[in-house]
Amino acid sequence: MNDLSHDQRVAGLKGLGSSRKRVEDARFTQGKGNYVDDIKMPDMLFGDFVRSQYAHARIRSVDTSKAVALPGVIAVLQAADLAPLGLHWMPTLAGDKQMVLADGKVLFQGQEIAFVIAEDRYICADAIELIEVEYEELPVVVDPFKALQPGAPVLREDLAGQTKGAHGERIHHNHIFRWEVGDKEGTEAVVAGADVVAEEMVYYHRTHPCPLETCGCVASMDKINGKLTLWGTFQAPHVVRTVASLLSGIPESSIRVVSPDIGGGFGNKVGVYPGYVCAIVASIVTGRPVKWIEDRMDNLMATAFARDYWMQGKIAATAEGKITGLWCHVTADHGAFDACADPTKFPAGFFSICTGSYDIPVAYVGVDGVYTNKAPGGVAYRCSFRVTEAAYFIERMIEVLAIKLGMDSAELRRINFIRKEQFPYQSALGWEYDSGDYHTAWDKALNAVGYDALRAEQAQRVADFKAGKTRSLMGIGLSFFTEIVGAGPVKNCDILGMGMFDSCEIRIHPTGSALARLGTISQGQGHATTFAQILATETGIPADQITIEEGDTDTAPYGLGTYGSRSTPVAGAATAMAGRKIRAKAQMIAAYLLEVHDNDLEWDVDRFVVKGVPERFKTMKEIAYAAYNQAIPGLEPGLEAVSYYDPPNMTYPFGAYICVMDIDADTGVADIRSFYALDDCGTRINPMIIEGQVHGGATEAFAIAMGQEIAYDEMGNCMTGTLMDFFLPTAWETPHYTTDFTETPSPHHPIGAKGVGESPNVGGVPAFSNAVHDAFRPFGLTQSHMPHDHWRIWRIANQLGLHG
Amino acid sequence: MALELKDEILIPAPRDVVYAALNDTAMLKAAIPGCEELLRHSETDLEAKVVLKIGPIKARFGGKVVLDQSGAPGSFSLTGEGSGGVAGFAKGGAVVTLEDRGAETLLSYNATADVGGKIAQLGNRLIAGTAKKLADQFFASFAAAVTAAEAPAADETA
């Protein structure tokens, strides 16, 4: 390596900033991924559920006699079978409890009633058809506002008389919690005395992460050695192991949880589902491996949904447009059980980031969680906890305020942005924004799209439309978002009591290659690629010679998993810190080998060099070998390190997104002409992966804003239980994206990285939605709820009288 | 999901005959598409087993039907509910009115149903069309059967 230049050595590492190709793709693109449903074991049984056809009913009887008599059926589990083990209910991540199998009644369509265990999936399906469930129908509530009315049906009879829940007082039998942040009186006083107040109800509809691989697991209890192995679609395998141990009484040391390749997670695979519990019980009872895999309908109607937030907002401003206060009340529909996946102390996640990117002096947020006859969930679908709701709320309120003020909303944003010199910025709702430069990003974005020219074109289009020369309208959707990711500091963030640190363990092999294991788990993010890059820059070992392993609790260090854009901010930091421990020991070894003092050495890409004597150095490869073959006084052999990283703060990625859309007023068809995404995620580890993340996140944002929905009819039937009704964009619908960036490193993160995987969803949804609203703003539209599918856009045009 | 069906059909038989046929279980069983069993427990209570196919779902529905004959012979109504196990359930009712049109009878029906479970989920795009098709099939078979019964001589000579 001696004859290589400094720059060549840097390039050879493929470290930070390199658009290194994803090492995962070799197997994914050749059909060699290993997903949960690919796991097949000798003697393996299959389990599946009898699910409720009703959204709310008492279970009078379940007749399993015909099913049990079917050859190949091993057993049928019901709540009464699990009750002696205390497993007919299970705790949720939100401090509530959830039925594993229906205990007397069902509370949502698709709820699990009985678990059939059979020799294979086909027999299971046949047996399920033979089970006769007798229901007594009960009144259904699918509207959270109706659920809170005085005479509303009682959904959770198990909570009768309980006036306190996991998050304080319950004010109604269908009420879960009230969570309040900020200065209520102060905000209401500002709103009462403001020059201008814009008030609006903003609804972020119910949708679903819909990962390509549905949820599932294989549980295998080895009765000889007492060890339970559980392969599954887990975004947080260590947490699953802890929960499994607490529920089953099996010591954690005898439980191995493995997340193999997971075909996407997006928050859907954070929670613990009845299928996992039943598969484990079934394996323990039968002594055989048991597989449970959802089909698409099961996934869409029963495992964790996202959003369903009714956000009532009031935004106050001066006549010039300077925002003076923000008031918000959320009615949060959590479905039948509160199975929201948020850090314990945050029942509405980080929704209080809803002051967004703006310097708002006073604010208040109140959130009421409500039970309804819908599936439980409320997960962070490609966003940090409730952050996309918050970003959508504030970005709609800015537009509504701009309408009220008669202002251009780009300018309204600009005059209210938190200024660069205000960072670290203390928000009115209690967050410390670590860093940002919003004005620079905004100007770059507006220039890049040619904002003024677009507005001129739009004005001409409106004139032409009114003159009858065109039936096409044009919308310019603006969005500026600030995310809060990287949960989080142990002092205030935990999941079931486990602090939200993360971890990395590194072994440098004698020949200078390395293995690193982390507490996170990639579901497509490319951890094996990017974490190796962090380590390459920290240790001087080429990324191509670093293997990254995750997802096996027997080998990986304890970590809280991957969701909420926390992997890079937390585990990425642990990786850098562990790499620095390696380098510190390497420096001592190099000093010994070069016979100089530690302080006489300096680090240069992949080696320690004697200061002022560039020809005297030891490369990391040489140092690694020495660590294993030399007796170095005062040092243990080997070269390994572990870091458990407790982040001092969250990170605050931000960005500016602009969508230009042409809308056919007569058909409601929206054609995305361009979509520009500027992201500032701090230090950029792999620009190619960032671009891929932005494409993926923006596509999910497009789906959510323009059509994706979990809809219920008044009987509680889930009307969007298949991909025929649930919109999942394909290449045909997906727009083209232009990506851009600014780079404002996080001051507290070891390498300055902030996380990016979820930003495009958080910023993208308001960009698409605002474009639709903007197209109709000249005709008097203020607010129309998502999703903006063709018929709903047509209806906007119709209601505005544009159809003549 | 709520479902509503309305239509009318001209049956070439007098009203009394049509009314009697509507109360004839054997005739109904023959006309109901997929009907495997139709039992009469009393003058007004019936029980049926029907195999239905809606889109990708095929299931055997078991149900109870209660007749209201108080409007005879000008009208006839029924309410019922049925369950298809994992396929879902339905409940609803229908009012049938019979008007004299000389030697013929104009049969009009107005049916409403609430459909739940998997058929409502999977079939929501198909269910209205399927229900209409089944109703058409029923009345076509029914009209044919009534007509055939009215003209036994023709049958015998055939």
Image: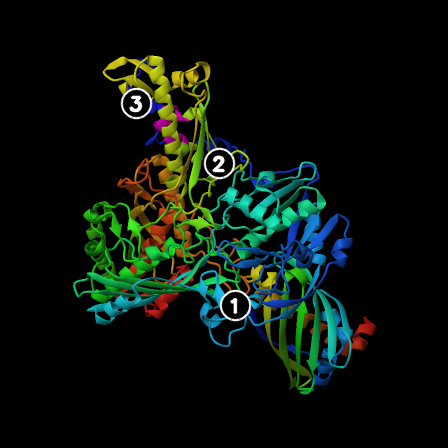
Left-right relation of A127 to B94: right
Residue A759 screen position, x and y as percent:
35, 47
Q: Chain of mark 2?
A: A
Specify the farthest residue to the right.
B156
Given residues A803 and A93, the one toward you in this image is: A93
Name the mark on residue A162. 1
Q: Are marks 3 and 1 in contact (CB under 8 Å)?
A: no
At label 2, which amino acid type do we have? Pro
Residue kind at label 3, given as amino acid type: Trp
Q: Which quadrant is home to the C terminus of chain A?
A: bottom left
Residue A380 lies within the magenta run: no
Q: On what subunit does the disc labeled 1 rest?
A: A
Crowd tier of the residue under label 1, counting other residues whose Cα lies within 10 Å: few below 14, some 14–19, many 20 or above: few
Task: Give me the C-alpha separation between circle 1 and circle 2.
Answer: 39 Å
Q: Dividing the picture into quarters, in which one does residue A289 lie?
A: top right
Q: What is the chief secondary structure element of the magenta stretch?
A: helix
Q: Earlier in the sequence, mark 3 or mark 1?
A: 1
Magenta span of residues: A532-543
Looking at the rendered structure, the secondary structure element under dot 2 is loop
Determine which residue is flagged by label 2.
A557
Is residue A734 something that shows in the picture?
no
Chain letter belonging to callout 3 = A
B5 versus A355 height, above or below: below
Viewer-proximal residue among A205 and A564: A564
> Which badge, 1 or 2, comes first in the chain's sequence?
1
